[in-house]
Image (tube, helix red, strand yellow):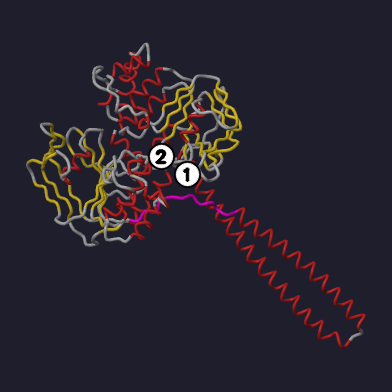
Amino acid sequence: MEHQIYMYMHSPTVLNGSNLSYELPSLGTLPRILFQNVNVTIHQDSRIGLIAANGMGKSTFLKILAGEIIPQQGTVTRMGSVFYLPQISTLDLQVSQNSVLDWLSSHSDEWWTITALLAEKFAMELVLSQPLSSLSGGELTKLWLAHALSKQPDILLLDEPTNHLDLPGLEQLERALQGFCGAVVIVSHKPFFLDRVVSRIWELTPGKIQVYGGNYTFWRSQKEIAEENALRLHEVARKQLQQAETAAQKEEQRAAQSRQQGRKNAGSIPKIIASEKKRSAEVTAGIAKKKHEALLEKAHQKVLETRIPTTKCAFIQLEEVSHKQRNLINIQGANLSLGSRLLIKNIQLHIASGDRVAIAGVNGSGKSSLAKAILGIDKGIFTGGEVAIASSMKIVYLDQNYQLVNRSATVLENMQLVNPKLNYQLHRQQLGHFLFCHDAVYKPASSLSGGELARLAMAMISVAAIDLLILDEPTNNLDLLTINQFVDGLNAFSGAIWVISHDIDFQSRIGITQAYHIKNHQLQPLTYLPKDREKYYQELL
């Protein structure tokens, strides 16, 4: 999709945030400012994407807009109703033994309106007696979205609603938002989705919010232009500083030569004239020195002002076991079953060194089961046909729940478990690349957030020798900056990659060479690759 620029005829205002400030307390150090003196306006028809790196305060900002958190400074004026949907993973619903009906009736006196919207907007019907804990992340997301729509709020604040949705689910959410009459502010790490649903970007940066009038692709293009301009300005400032330093050195040399010449000439002219010449030369030299010092100070200040702030992000470098070309996986005509249930029939799949394979399909179609069956870590079994897997092949599987990470071990112990040959210093150094510094390496893995678990898992695979890297929804808990680093790491990796993902933007950037779609129990090769994003997306639908 081409990036778009939107012209606005503003509809009525439904929310105003004025001079909003919020800081996080920090033990032993100064508080960390999330944002300061921020002003925002939401109009009745606003479609806004809120983006920032993890930990920058996106969820906090949404909660302030919703009234769940009071800003330390500033006010929020709401001219209509607000519904805030937090991240599904933070709702802790999986432990609930209540039935779906219990949940529905506790949230609405007219709970049937929720089930009606669930069927209408998301083509989903629930058994009312089933435990809420039996619902998948995608099903819970749709249930909460239907509940939100049933409230008919003036403003809908959505925090990561795309995390657990497959492509049909994303399409359904897109259409539901298109039919929604109120304003929407949405946090999502899926650029392709943001391109289709938002017309304005709020970028939350340290201390402030930057507003861009366009979709995600437009924001990215503007950021690239701004970064190029910033680099150019900084380079100009550095050159001006060098010129000022050279000029100051030349002036110092000229003044020294003048003083030396004055001393030589002092004996051949009257003392009164020599003294006058000396005073005049000193005044002239002093003026010149102050002038060059002022120019130097100004040049130094310009360099500081144009310096580009750096953001901490993970450095990702993957290591391949062997650079030799060889066949890794060859499946011809086999069926994959899970118990008595047939998942995929007559599979035709060949993966060699260097191949990059994307496998798509709706949730429950067998994408992950196929990978796990090859690894021998699931109950899925192959029957019939031929299944050939290269001997001594090193496969690393990064699943969406990060089972690679031992939750009972610390961050550092997990690194040592995956590659015990590396010494302590190298483990610490590599963990530092993934932003685990100082005492953070001794944190138990069980205490890590979703984003931290993702970074630890990537740190672990970065020190493991790999022939085939299988990635199962790898971007779910990653912010956009870390995704960029992950893309760079994957593009520098020469081993084979197998990707299971609903993130089309991510797939489009890692050089996929084969694409398949599991549909009607068949692994079907696709005509278009993710690099043709819109055609690929339409073919999947």
Q: Nearer the viewer, residue 70 or 202?
A: 70
- Circles 1 and 2: CB atoms closer than 8 Å: yes
Which residue, as the protein is rendered here, is positioned at the far bottom? 268
Main SS category, magenta section: loop
Disc 1 crowd, CA 10 A, few/some/many (<14, 14-19, 20+) = some
| Residue 248: % across, % down | 70, 69
In screen coordinates, is 112 left or right of 270?
Answer: left
What residue is shown at x 11% (from left), y 47% (from top)?
387
The residue wearing badge 2 is 191
In this rendering, is residue 39 above or below 438? above
In screen coordinates, is 135 left or right of 327?
Answer: right
* Amino acid residing under circle 2: Pro
Q: Nearer the viewer, residue 539 or 144?
A: 144
Q: Secondary structure at mark 2?
A: helix
What residue is shown at x 74% (from left), y 76% (from top)?
254
What residue is shown at x 60% (from left), y 36% (from top)?
37
| Residue 186: % across, % down | 44, 31
Which residue, as the protein is rendered here, is positioned at the far top? 109
The residue wearing badge 1 is 220
Q: Nearer the viewer, residue 491 or 530?
A: 491
| Residue 419: % across, % down | 27, 56
In screen coordinates, is 48 left or right of 443?
Answer: right
Which numbered marker is on residue 262? none
Which residue, as the protein is rendered here, is positioned at the far left? 384
Badge 1 or badge 2: first in the primary sequence = 2
In this rendering, is residue 468 above or below 453? below
Instruction: Please state the extent of the stretch shown in magenta in the rendering.
Output: 306-317
* Amino acid residing under circle 1: Arg
Image quadrant for the N terminus? top left
Image quadrant for the C terminus? top left
Q: Secondary structure at mark 1?
A: helix
